[in-house]
């Protein structure tokens, strides 16, 4: 499991460092079960604030992993015939999303 955070509050970074090893600034790595991964994901979602995060974990898919993004981020997962790829949202979508918050 890998979590990359940007513009994350200190409280979230501290919480993540309890569960995962911070190998670079904002990059956390660890091995956990699906249940624990979901618990960590929910903590990230609650504490993220104005930041953004990408969470990646191993999965029995063609690519060997799955991922999810949280917060304001132009990159988002897109399913193309069972293969998850990254697509970019238009900058206009990003502006309207931040205005809604």
Image (cartoon, rainbow, N blue to C red):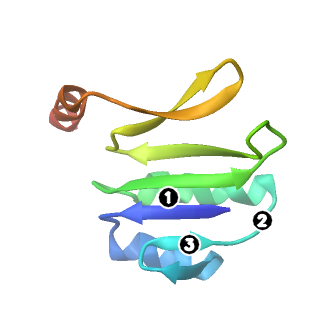
Labels 3 and 1 touching (C-beta < 8 A): no
Whole-percent x, y for residue 94 in the image? 23, 34
Whole-percent x, y for residue 85 in the image? 57, 34
Pointer 2 local density, CA inside 10 Å: few below 14, some 14–19, many at least 20: some
| Looking at the image, residue 83 lies above or below residue 98 | above
Give residue 49's quadrant in the image.
bottom left
| Looking at the image, residue 55 lies above or below residue 100 | below
Q: Secondary structure at mark 1?
A: helix
Q: Nearer the viewer, mark 3 or mark 1?
A: 3
Residue most extreme to the right: 60
Pointer 1 local density, CA inside 10 Å: few below 14, some 14–19, many at least 20: many
Quadrant containing the C terminus is top left
Q: Secondary structure at mark 2?
A: loop
C-alpha gap between disc 1 and disc 2: 15 Å
Q: Which label sits on residue 32? A: 2
Q: Secondary structure at mark 3?
A: strand
Pointer 3 local density, CA inside 10 Å: few below 14, some 14–19, many at least 20: many
Q: Which label sits on residue 44? A: 1
Mark closest to the chain's N terminus, 3 or 1: 3
Q: Which label sits on residue 31? A: none
User: Is residue 26 found left or right of 74 in the rendered image?
Assistant: right
Q: Between 60 and 95, which is closer to the camera in this rendering?
A: 60
Q: Between 43 and 74, which is closer to the camera in this rendering?
A: 74
Labels 1 and 2 touching (C-beta < 8 A): no
Task: Identify the residue shown where x is 79% and y is 46%.
Answer: 59
Mark closest to the chain's N terminus, 1 or 2: 2
Task: Identify the residue shown where x is 40% and y is 40%.
Answer: 75
Mark 3 lies on residue: 28
Give residue 60's quadrant in the image.
top right
């Amino acid at each position: 499991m890998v979590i990359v955070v940007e513009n994350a509050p200190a409280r979230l970074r501290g919480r993540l460092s309890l569960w995962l090893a911070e190998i670079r600034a904002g990059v956390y790595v660890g091995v956990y079960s699906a249940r624990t991964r979901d618990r960590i994901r929910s903590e990230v979602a609650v504490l993220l604030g104005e930041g953004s995060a990408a969470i990646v974990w191993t999965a029995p898919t063609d690519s060997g992993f799955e991922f999810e993004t949280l917060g304001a981020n132009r990159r988002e997962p897109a399913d193309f015939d069972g293969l998850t790829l990254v697509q970019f949202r238009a900058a206009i979508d990003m502006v309207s999303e931040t205005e809604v918050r």
